[in-house]
Amino acid sequence: MASNGGSKILAAYRATTGFAEPLVGSLLRRRLARGKEDADRLPERLGRPGRVRPKGPIVWIHAASVGESISILPIINELGRLLPSATVLLTTGTVTSGRVMGERLPRNAFHQFVPVDTPSAVRAFLDYWQPGLALWVESELWPNLLHETRLRQIPIVLLNARMSDRSFRRWRRAKVMAAELLGTFDLCLAQDDDVAAKLEALGAQHVEIPGNLKLVGEPLPFDADALTELQSAVGGRPVWLLASSHDGEEQLGAFTHRDLAAHIPQLLTVIVPRHPQRGPQIAANLEPLFRVVRRSKGELPRRDTEIYIADTLGELGVFYRLSPLAVMGGSFVPHGGQNPLEPARLGVAVLSGPHIGNFRDIYRVLAAAGGAEVLASNDQLTQRAGQLLTDGLELQKRGLAAAKAAGTKAPLVRTFELLAPYLRNLHASAGP
């Protein structure tokens, strides 16, 4: 466990963020103007509660954004079963994650936005909620929040820890600071052997490897009426999906459609952009060359539609059920990929570009089972997608393999075995 004195760098960070507190309001207002904050819940970012604290112990889980918070839903559900008297407080930092979690959290949990990492906001947050256990997800390390949590002698566990090669190289240049931050955790649970080795090299004291929690989880929810309506509009046309695309990938998807459509009559390409607000610009870029329809305008694919832009929020569960093949965005540009388990759980075959750093271990599991393929270059997309779309048996085989590989519960079971001592110590005196 790290000392409370702290390194000079972290002491300077705490002092600087303290001096900067008068500027936080202005920063939040600028973020609000860019759509990065929720106007109705802005006080939560200053540590002020957005609701009354429930009675009994609170397990506080912090996850950065949508992907991390979705991956932790099995943990929240299991906590509800094991600790019916406790409540889970989930914090995240993005507007989208707040909306999604508002819809998907079970009854034993509620959402708040994480406070900005200044001393006053952090203290106000912890003084009000008084969690009895803190579970941090994956890789976010906020120094003030960790420091103040440790000062209150709240146990802290790092769940499903991950660390890219780039992050590891950066932390090695600040190894003393990394060791102190990681030393704040009573226990670090790594996704795989590689992450565990990196954490230990940076000074983490107690590291275990229960496996990747993203391999656990329920299929994405969906609106059955919306799916039926889309299936009726599409009819028997062949469909493929470019999921969670980033800037530059929509053009790749469109020209892949052009090449595939020359050999696959009536082909429909569905593009779901990672950021739906980009829909109008994507359409404007593609309309000179393709017949494009946008879902955010309430439109359905017509018989002559070539590209359907699904620029709405929270409907990936519908579109994965519409298409037997998902090409994962964020992997054809240097972003690190998007989560391939979401389509895999629904029996959808997966293709990816070469940039998969954020999900390398998951792709290893899916590829070994035959449910996913990582392409060596963008140039291979047309050939491989075409081969699958024209071989129904192979496509079905890959989808079944993906579903089987994505169905494990082992990481969840092992995680709770390791959490058991902390859960036993969590009782009603942990909070008001």
Image (spheres, grey):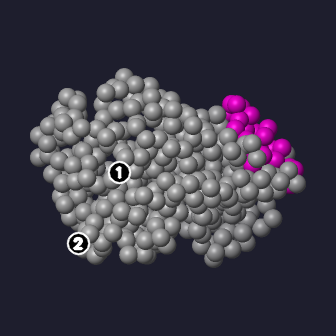
Q: Secondary structure at mark 2?
A: loop
**Which residue carries the number 2 mark?**
432
Q: Quadrant of residue 360?
A: top right
Residue type pointed to by label 1:
Ile
Q: Please say whether residue 153 is visible from this viewpoint.
A: yes
Tell me how far mark 1 sits from mark 2, CA to CA: 20 Å
**Which residue carries the number 1 mark?**
156
Comparing 356 with 35, the one in front is 356
Residue type pointed to by label 2:
Pro
Q: Is residue 316 above or below residue 187?
A: below
- The verdict on residue 322 being magenta is no
Q: Quadrant of residue 253?
A: top right
- The verdict on residue 381 being magenta is yes
Comparing 19 with 413, the one in front is 413
Q: Position of residue 337 (x, y in %)?
A: 57, 41
Magenta extent: 370-392
Residue at 20% across / 64% down in the picture?
128
Residue at 17% across / 47% down in the picture?
119
Q: Please say whether residue 266 is visible from this viewpoint.
A: no
